[in-house]
Amino acid sequence: MDRLIFTPDERSEALAIIRRLRTGINALAKGDDERHVWAYVKKALRDGSADRNAFGLNPVLLALQTAQIAVDEIGLKRDGVMAILLYAVADTSEECIECIKSDFGDSVALIIHGLGKIQELYRKNPIIESENFRNLLLSFAEDMRVILIMIADRVNLMRQIRDTENIEAKTEVSEEASYLYAPLAHKLGLYKLKSELEDLSLKYLEHDAYYMIKEKLNATKKSRDAYIERFIAPIDKKLKEAGFKFHMKGRTKSIHSIWQKMKKQQCAFEGVYDLFAIRIILDSPQTLEKVQCWQVFAIITDMYQPNPKRLRDWLSVPKSNGYESLHITVLGPENKWVEVQIRTERMDEIAERGLAAHWRYKGVKGESGLDEWLNSIRTALENKDDLQVIDQFKMDLYEDEVFVFTPKGDLMKFPKGATVLDFAYRIHSNIGNRCVGAKIGGKAVTFRYVMKNGDQVEIMTSTTQKPKQEWLNIVKTSRAKSKIRMALKEQMVKDGAYAKEMFERRLKNRKIEFEESAVSHLIKKLGFKEANDFYRKMADGTLDVNLVIDKYQEQLRHDNNMNPQQPARSAEDFSYENPNEDMIRSNDDVLVIDRNLKGVDYSLAKCCNPIYGDDVFGFVTVSGGIKIHRKDCPNATELRKRFGYRIVKAKWSGKGSSQYSITLKIIGNDDIGIVNNITSIISKEEKIMMRNINIDSHDGLFSGNLTVNVEDTSRLEQLIKKIRNVKGVKQIIRI
């Protein structure tokens, strides 16, 4: 690598800056500081490690220029200057940092270490235009002076690249100055540097707009200053007469601000009302602030015609960032519109605080330290004789927040104590559910790892992983907790469904019928309130499936009133006769025949076995008696056709205690236990008695007749429905 050679101009400028720095930091410099610094510089020049940057600029001279800005415009002293000069020529390895600590002290070493960490962030290729990145810089810098040096360095670089031919790099540097460094300067109260960064960014990025506005401002400066004096003179007199304590100032907007106004209002330079503004700042007790502001407003609007459309009342309802002020645009001398801002000392202080005022105004937890910190910095910056306070000051901001990177460089904010698992669930629920750990800087960590500022997190997943209850104690964010609870609930449902399916499959393999009612009884008997709990315990092995099956069989036999010794059997050649058939009572129901004929002998037809509830009709027999048939009797059509004159109306007049014999034809698949299942249903039905059952089976199919005694059609329909639901039953017909 070629050695860095100073041009005559560079050498001359460097020597001049060195002389000024000696004067600026003389009181705080230590005896060997200069000798030690130049030893590092000479070593870098000798080794060829100091090289010109992308713009061809000398790094040593750049460091001297930056140090001059830091001293003159920010107020840094010995430690800041030493760090700036050394960082330009020394590496940031631990070994080198230790040497610097030995030669210059802990404070200088800490600043250089912080600058090195910031460069590491840049190398992660983050999306630096985000607000999160600015916040990360503030929280990541171990020493406040790191950020101040970064701002001074960017201001200096922006000054030096005016005539560069590397347009692409110039554009990138200017864009960063606009969306990163200018807002940082604003946060720190460095308004002069903030405006310079914005104006230079506009100059390099939108050249024509910048020079157009600059020329117009220059052309009108003398007349504008004279106009301001003419405008405020009568106001000053009136306010003093009214007894107000105040001071006034007129300020011209920056070129960048004017350009932003022109774009927002879509107007030419001449169309911007407020090229300058008059600010009236009252020294007012807080209890009288609003009253006095409105009194001043009344005085001014009496003197000058106001534009009602341009009234901005942020006294009654402050802005969301805490800004309070009263703005009015009035028609001044020569019919020129002038913006007047009326506020108190307290309001002006808040207005000058940027985002810090918002945090104090809102009282957001975790950011309260910034206000105290800015006060300390502001006091130190204003007191040029005593800036040692900065040397001992460590940032204590964002103590409740952590900023980390995704593998693509996106920045995410989490509460302090958040883990890799929180990060995974922020990306996606499925990523969180399958998370087994992460890689942090190439090193594998568990999902319990507590993230630190600047970590780059790459989540590792496994298809076999699933959420667990204890995860709720690992995550910090409510979002992750909510997603874990949802996943656990879904998992419970899945586990329950799986366990139920497994249980049914086990029963089927052992030729045991699954009966929902028996399972429900068993679940309650085992002490479970919910079926899901029962199945989940089977799924996780807490309940032994084989033991449950044994218990289920006992419950099934109990529910079906079956002798435990009675073996389950198929339907082949099954026959049953009720020994108590003679005890079945005869019909004592009353039928209304025709027009309420009394004393007529009637009987129920055997061809269709009508029962209470059936639609019926009467048929007069040859012997003079009446047979009662169902209206859907197989013989009904023929009887009506051939013997219509013998048909009489009939209907049930009331229900007695009778039971009626009916026969059901059942067809289905033969299987072990099919008969038990059918007969168990009948045995559990109240007021239904089985008279007989005859079933024949061939080639795995069975068919047979079942005769029962029932009270009415509603009980018959319920019985048919239950038998139809028996596994294996294909068809059931009343005959």
Image (cartoon, rainbow, N blue to C red):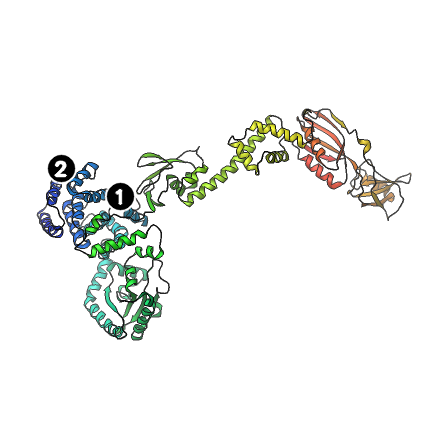
| Quadrant in the picture for the N terminus | top left
| Quadrant in the picture for the C terminus | top right
At which x and y percent is residue 143? 24, 46
Q: Which residue is mark 2?
A: 47
Q: Is residue 237 left or right of residue 436?
A: left
Q: Is residue 201 visible?
A: no
Tell me the crowding category of disc 2: few under 14, some 14 to 19, or many 20 or more residues within 10 angstroms, Cα based.
Answer: few
Residue 267, above or below 559: below
Name which quarter of the figure residue 419 lies in. Answer: top left
Identify the secondary structure beneath mark 2.
helix
Q: Earlier in the sequence, mark 1 or mark 2?
A: 2
**Of the numbered discs in the image, which one, if any, rests on residue 68?**
none
Q: Which residue is mark 1?
A: 122
At which x and y percent is residue 94? 21, 37
Amino acid residing under circle 1: Tyr
Q: Is residue 576 visible?
A: yes
